[in-house]
Image: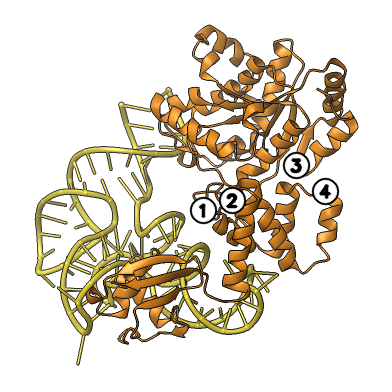
Chain colours: A orange, B yellow
Amino acid sequence: MNFLDPEKQLGIIERGVDGLISSKELLSKLIKSRETGRPLKIKAGFDPTAPDLHLGHCVLLKKLKDFQELGHEIIFLIGDFTAQIGDPAGKTETRPALTRDEIIKNSKTYERQVFKILDKSKTKVLFNSKWLSKLSVQDLLALTSQVNIARLLERDDFNKRYKGGVAITLKEFIYPLIQAYDSVQIESDVELGGTDQTFNILLGRDFQRYFNQEPQVAIFLPILEGLDGVKKMSKSLGNYIGVEEDPVDIFGKVMSVSDELMWKYFDLLSAKTEQEITELKSLHPMDAKKILAKELAELLYDKSAAESAFRDFETKFSKRSFPKDAKVVKLDINNVKTLVDFVLLVSGNLKSKGDAKRLIIQGGLTINGEKYSDIDGDLPDATEFEVKIGKKEFCKVLTK
RNA sequence: GGAGGAGUGCCCGAGUGGUCAAAGGGAGCAGACUGUAAAUCUGCCGGCUUAGCCUUCAGAGGUUCAAAUCCUCUCUCCUCCA
């Protein structure tokens, strides 16, 4: 393996990260790696509990990909051991214990999604139960002796909860130790994580020192805000762009990101260089965003899918014409008495009649290019309808 | 083990016998404005056979003409003391 010049590698790695401890250590590791021809071991840990990845996770995956492209070894660590125990307390972190089967199933889903970005053949997948299930009480106690409670309490979320009188379970205290011990087992050179992982990753350094290893470099990645532009992207907040969503949806959702936030997306997710991004800033923001949307669709699918998502968007919204490939709904018109029934049967997004009525009354229903806003009105006399429901839903309806 | 506090609609949160399908905010949906931007503004926002009816305020019973509100038990969560 021929490695790039360490300084250049460092430049690529440092881009877009929120913290790096320390770049000096990383540089010396990179130099050593090039001299000995040994790739660095890059650790990233994942819980097998929530296998629905979104662009927020991609920030980390993208950085792993950078490492991968530089020739280093990615270790994708699945925290199956801890997931089997579950979490009895902590409202925000309630994690039910998972069975072996669920974990395996989740891991598969995980891998499928992760390898949309990472190169499967160059990624090593490990499960931490491999060594943790053999860890004795004695071993665990030895680890606990290395950690001071006062230090644990310094960790931001513990600190807040302790002061605010919110429960902290002992398990939560132990959790970072286990994660840190994983680094010892892997002998990782670098660990990546979100800024919320700061404490855990740094503790990994302490443990590695304790076991006479060279401490890992810690890299922290920033949080990506979701579609609302304020809160972090997360599934539970519904402001996410999922990696397995349809390319058309990915494209559309990226387009609805605010102009300001778009640049952060560029920084964290795009393969473009800083100069290229600077040049894009002179374009109309919408055009820059189209480039971003296309790139991200391509990242998660391929060029042709991205192209067709782009064309689809142009048709629907830029030219405001009815898309040729709108979903087709076949309907027995004899069963349809009112417009309300009609929309309800055609749309996949309406929950109730009240919903459908509201949509019609407020002007969200267009059939064959005409607005239908009277709920007692009649359907046009035709056998084929081009129906637009709300802003985003297009259906072609064929009657039987 | 002891003492105290809390559980309300998707989320936060007001409501302490009738005027409560339940204030306010957020989210969501639709419309206007646009670039499907963002921000803003307007309307909607439990369900239905909609001047009405039905199901909701942790769960089960009870008091009452009437209960989210009062009583009993149960469950869950939190805090403090041990």
Across and down, in percent, residue A320 comes to: 58, 76
Circle nearer the N terminus (3, 4): 3
Q: Residues within 10 Å of mark 2 (few under 14, many from 20)?
A: many
Nearest the viewer among A359 and A233 is A359
Circle nearer the N terminus (3, 2): 3
State the mark number for residue A273.
4
State the mark number for residue A116.
none
Residue beneath disc 2: A233
Q: Contact, CB < 8 Å: mark 2 with mark 1? A: yes
Residue beneath disc 3: A18
Tell me what residue is drawn at x 52 percent, y 51 percent: A245
Element on which disc 1 rests: loop
Q: Residues within 10 Å of mark 1 (few under 14, many from 20)?
A: few
Element on which disc 2 rests: loop
Q: Type of residue at label 2?
A: Met
Of all chains, the one bearing label 2 is: A
Q: Quadrant of residue A13?
A: top right
State the mark number for residue A237.
1
Measure the C-alpha gap from mark 3 to mark 2: 17 Å
